[in-house]
Image: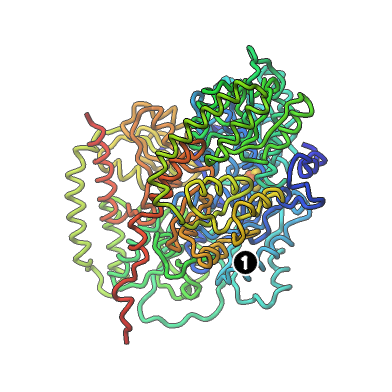
Amino acid sequence: MTTITSPQKSLSVNPLKQSPPLGAALALLGLKGLVPLLHGSQGCTAFAKVLLVRHFREAIPIATTAMTEVSTILGGEENIEEAILTLVEKAEPELLGLLTTGLTETRGDDMPYILKLFRQRHPELKSLPIILASTPDYKGGLQEGYATAVKSIVETDYGAPPQETSQPVITVLAGSLLGPGDVQEIKEIIEAFGLTPLVIPDLSGSLDGHLDDSEYNSKTSGGTSLQQLQQLARSRFTIVIGESMRPAAEVLQQKFETNYQVFPRLSGLKTVDQFLWLLSQISEYPDTVPKKYQHQRRQLQDAILDSHFYLGGKKISLALEPDLLYQTSWLLQEMGVNIQAAVTTSKSPLLNDLPVDTVTIGDFGDLEELAPNSDLIITNSQGKLIADKLDIPLYRLGFPIYDRLGNGTRCLTSYRGTMQLLFDLSNLFIEHSH
Amino acid sequence: MTKPKVADLLHEPGCGHNHKKGDNKACSQQAKPGAAQGGCAFDGASITLVPITDAAHLVHGPTACAGNSWGSRGSLSSGATTYQLGLTTDVKENDIIFGGEKKLYSAIAQVINRYHPPAVFVYATCVTSLIGDDLEAVCRAATEQFQTPTIPVQAPGFTGTKNLGNRLAGEALFEYVVGTQEPEYTTPYDINLIGEYNVAGELWGVLPLLEKVGIRVLSKITGDATFREICYAHRAKLNVMICSKALINLGRKMEETYGIPYIEESFYGVADMNRCLRHIAEKLGDEELKARVETLIATETAKLDTALAPYRKRLQGKRIVLYTGGVKSWSIISAAQDLGMKVVATSTKKSTEEDKAKIKELLGEDGIMLSKGNAKELLKVIENTNADMLVAGGRNQYTALKARIPFLDVNQERHNPYAGYRGLIEMAKEFDHVLHSPIWEQVREPAPWSLVTSH
Ligand code: SF4
């Protein structure tokens, strides 16, 4: 049982947390033909956009309702209406995602009511689904905003009866601990079992870094499509990756009676074993796993042997959001690493069960106090300052990572991704051993 | 800051934006709902004040403001690193219900105890403004209690654009900082540089030049500045406003109050750099200084000509579309022209009438002035003008790259200094790399199978 310390501080030094609307926007970017719309003042959207652009090195479609001091006092109805109409005209979106911010939540804009009025006034937009999520800045961080948005995505009604598909559909709720490269890998694995994955959100189509034929996209060019969302009712099973996705899975169970299983992590030999085993059980050919993955498993075992010389007994400090912290710290523990310190952004049931005595809900200021004498720090690019100051090597993980390329394709889950992570870390230690 | 003051700033008489009556859109313009978006006033105020390297910068608000922005500025320091700290009250739901003033006060106390900064800048944000936290009162109390200047910066995001935020920051400097201390000594050659933020270390390419001719920079406002040097900025003989109308209110107020004249200059390109040095010498009115400046210009230009010759040959006649805000556009135009390139179109979105006239003159007859533009239109202009590349702020980088168009970044977060004579060589190098890279052919190459018509 891990002790959770959550110092009630009035001063946060070097925040680890990004804002929930940013996380929610990230989730929405995994849907096709959409522009996330942040209901707030322009700066929130500009900051979120800059971070997303720097991390993914992609053009990021995102818009603001551009609230001013005056419109805040009067209420946001008009701005929301104008923003939606402008987006519809300019980008012709297939889906709309509307997110609140700290400003409009503090003001208390009644969003469901505002949307109802909008619907009444604009019957011509009847068939345009609007996903609405409440994401005040002052509650949680990126992971919470992302999870809230995913829950809203599955709550929303997409109308139109789903068509029959030949293959069984498996829903995957992909948590914020996964990048586009992880999602791509998960899709390929599921397909290898003869199943059709319906991933929500599917960042692998939209933020995986590729050149499109069209020169310019004013909305997301890939991701989960409206047609796919309409298939949700037909899905045979929900695979949940990341504990924070559980509430969304519960929605699907209530709505469509779809059973689910949560994988709080998807790296490490045993957990990937279980994942593949589950897939084989729900596939047409129970108890068989494609040859390719049987081989990859042997490779991973070999990689574990090779890397344990470098990782065993090392002291590592981590500062990551709860889901990613859980996944990474358990993998390291299984490699014989000592977790020296764990810092995270917000509460989660996972925090009670970490391979470390105490976990601190805090910021980089806390990490700076806890990390001295570690052999390695694992956190996002903003940890560079502290890593340099403490003269400890840094392995970049989480969001944002703006001083490394390849965030759109990086895969650190499944057998293959686990191997990658073990090699990355071992190489770092080889490089820094004298 | 009270309402009338914001209105005053929007009607800043020193600002060319206001020369045409009733037309000050450039300053008051806010993002349109549903449109693309720029930074907020809080962002603008931070851009202006955070470069003060030994001060602490404390953001009173929820995660969105500081959490999403700390550590992302490109201003460099030659000494203190306190400014790099991301300090915030990280306001939570309870603070919103019960008010955040107590939390703020205790945060200020901790900042002062832990880091002993010469001053703390405290930034209001949308949420803490909306709930009515009295920043000024808290700062006043803290200043008295801790004997450390604690300065309220009243530029919450929803008051307006980045540009307005710059001015509100200037206002805070004028009201709380300038004139509060005295320099150890003064000379007849003391100037202030206003509106240069030492992005990518640009200042360091220029300061040695000034030093060489015997001009002393008394205060840098604010790139690589110490808090103290801004306190005694009122003893300078001349204010040199760099490439920015953003702090014009500060220049004008210092003229009114302390009788310091100001000039508006740019460090980009040979012509502008030369002119800047000459103007300073002229304003300081010293014949020997003027002579030293001429000698320096002669040596530097000669050196530069040699260094640039190979690049000029390779860049000759290349066509660029420039998309950047304000005065910067004309300074980059003149820098590009120094290199033999042709600017075929430029934005005038944030430009004043005066800027526009200047741009018109520089671009010539068939130059295109883009008064508004989104990514899509920008691409159209590039196509229509047959331009070789786009020069813009980082926000448009992927617009260009996704369309397989060469791109050069000229904004806040870039890594190369382009100011001064040295900066021009840097810029030439970058233009050359980007334009002549062997990659363009590959990214434009169609796949062999895409050429086969399949049936
Ligand atoms: S718009 Fe307001 S809430 Fe958003 S970042 Fe700017 S100051 Fe903060």
Element assignment for label 1: helix
| Quadrant housing residue B257 | top right
Residue type marked 1: Leu
Residue under the point 70% across and 38% down: B167
Q: Which residue is mark 1?
A: A87
Picture quadrant of residue B109: top right
Q: Is residue B109 visible?
A: no
In the picture shown, does residue A325 fall above or below B256? below
- Seen from the viewer's position, the closer of residues B197 and A301 is B197
* Quadrant of the image where one finds ligand 1: top right
Compared to residue B71, the image places residue A117 above or below, namely below
- Residue drawn at the location 55% of the way across and 46% of the way down: B334
> Would residue A130 be found to the left or right of residue A278 on screen?
right
Locate the N terminus of chain A and report the quarter of the image it occupies.
Answer: top left
Where residue B382 sits: x, y (%)? 52, 63
Which of the two residues, A59 or B217, is positioned nearer the viewer here? B217
